Image (spheres, rainbow, N blue to C red):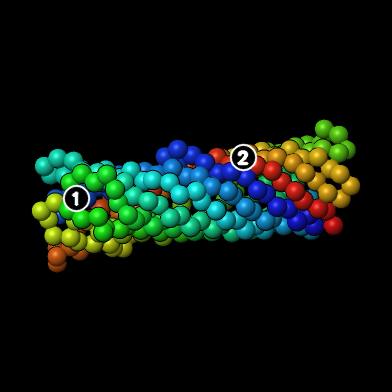
Amino acid sequence: MEPSVYVGYLFKDHGAGVEIQFSNGDVVGITSTRNDFDLQGVWLEAALPVVISENAALFAAVAHLFPVKTKALHSYRQLDGFARREWNTDIQWWELNAGLTYRLAPCAAGVGGFRWSSFVVNFNDPTGQLGFATSTDDAKLTANAYIPFFGLLVSGDPNCNSSLKAAVIGFPALPSDLEFQEVLSPTGQTSTSFDGKTNYKSGYFLEASGEASMKMDAWSLGAFVRFDLLHAERTRDFTVAGISRQAEIKFDRRNWIFGGKISAAF
């Protein structure tokens, strides 16, 4: 058993974005929107790998982002032109992981498991508005992903006190609940709320990571790097003023994490 703590800095310019295309009519004169925002903050993760046999080990982890507040740039295509505004973002991001590794060769192991990723963003206090009537609108993105994943872990020990690891995991689909709500009040139009139910269309998940560590008695200190990529597409059915509408929604999230690790073996 080797409980570990990872602390790193997560970042990516335009690391997350939501694109919406209204496919059978406009909503208060808007035909499509694009909302992009940076991801920045301190990533804290606690992990617990447990060896259960000579070739197999279980692992579990919980992680949370302590975000740095950033701006979101939201652009709109209208029937008669364009509009835009900026939002303040309030990000809440939690992840839970559980899985199994099984040795396939002296330096390689297969990885399989499950990840729940809860990603909620509140958009508020719009500024720099062009084509909107009020500054009291708000929006909210909720993305709960339930990701089975499989991959490969490669590891080596250059000497008795150091170790290197690299892993790639992913899944060619993205089971998830994806919701985006927004209050729209273009100049000269009645304010309306955009909400509704989404249906699965497509998606995928990919993560690549590397780690180097040095042993000191029962303790181990090291550094890690990680890249994550997540993509989801959904169809949303909703009603505005009693009229049925449909929207195609795309959600992307990608980020880097660089940081350090400390662990103790029991």
Q: Position of residue 183 (x, y in %)?
A: 25, 59
Q: Position of residue 49 (x, y in %)?
A: 73, 55
User: With respect to residue 252, does 141 lie above or below?
Assistant: below
- Looking at this view, is 88 or 202 the one in front? 88
Which image quarter is the N terminus in? bottom right
Q: Is residue 111 left or right of residue 190?
A: right
Task: Give, as a three-letter code, the residue at label 2.
Answer: Phe
Residue placed under numbered mark 1 in the picture: 132
Residue lying at 23% horizontally and 62% vertically, measured from the top left = 193
Q: Position of residue 233 (x, y in %)?
A: 36, 49
**Helix, strand, or loop for circle 2?**
strand
Which image quarter is the C terminus in? bottom right
How much space separates mark 2 and mark 1, taking CA atoms?
39 Å
Q: Position of residue 52 (x, y in %)?
A: 79, 58
Residue placed under numbered mark 2 in the picture: 258
Q: Quadrant of residue 155?
A: top right
Residue lying at 15% horizontally and 54% vertically, measured from the top left = 28
Q: Quadrant of residue 224?
A: top right
Q: Is residue 19 left or right of residue 61?
A: left
Q: Is residue 250 left or right of residue 206?
A: left
Task: Give, as a three-letter code, the residue at label 1.
Answer: Phe
